[in-house]
Amino acid sequence: METRYSMLKDLRKKYKVTQKFIAELLDIRTNVYQGYEYGNRELPVKYAKRLGRFFQFDWWLLYEEKR
């Protein structure tokens, strides 16, 4: 199922890092990060900004509506 945060999984796989690695980067539990990636939780802006820096993308894209 495509979620608004599906981009997170795509980037994570492109960079060949695990959910655990990203959770540690954000200083959160792995299951919390999984909730963001699966679209079950709202991703806080502070984490979006960190991910944007790490993955080198415009973090605002995570919040744009798909057309």
Image (cartoon, rainbow, N blue to C red):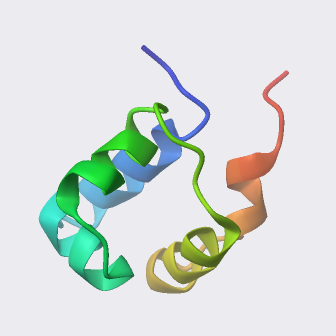
Residue at the image position 50 percent from the left and 45 percent from the top: 7
Residue at the image position 31 percent from the left and 58 percent from the top: 12
Image height of 46 relative to 35, above or below: below
Q: Is residue 18 visible?
A: no
Where, by quadrant of the figure, is residue 53 drawn? Answer: bottom right
Location of the C terminus (image quadrant): top right
Residue 1 x, y percent position in the rendering: 42, 13
Q: Farthest residue to the top: give it.
A: 1
Image height of 51 relative to 10, above or below: below
Q: Nearer the viewer, residue 12 or 35?
A: 35
Residue 46 appears left or right of 22? right
Residue 57 x, y percent position in the rendering: 62, 72
Where, by quadrant of the figure, is residue 66 drawn? Answer: top right
Residue 23 appears left or right of 2? left
Where, by quadrant of the figure, is residue 47 drawn? Answer: bottom right
Residue 17 appears left or right of 14? left
Residue 42 x, y percent position in the rendering: 59, 45
Image height of 12 relative to 35, above or below: below
Q: Nearer the viewer, residue 23 or 10?
A: 23
Image height of 12 relative to 42, above or below: below
Residue at the image position 44 percent from the left and 51 percent from the top: 8
Residue 29 x, y percent position in the rendering: 23, 65
Q: Is residue 26 visible?
A: yes
Q: What is the total number of numbered labels drawn onto the structure image?
A: 0
Residue at the image position 53 percent from the left and 82 percent from the top: 50
Q: Nearer the viewer, residue 39 or 52?
A: 39
Residue 37 appears left or right of 14? right
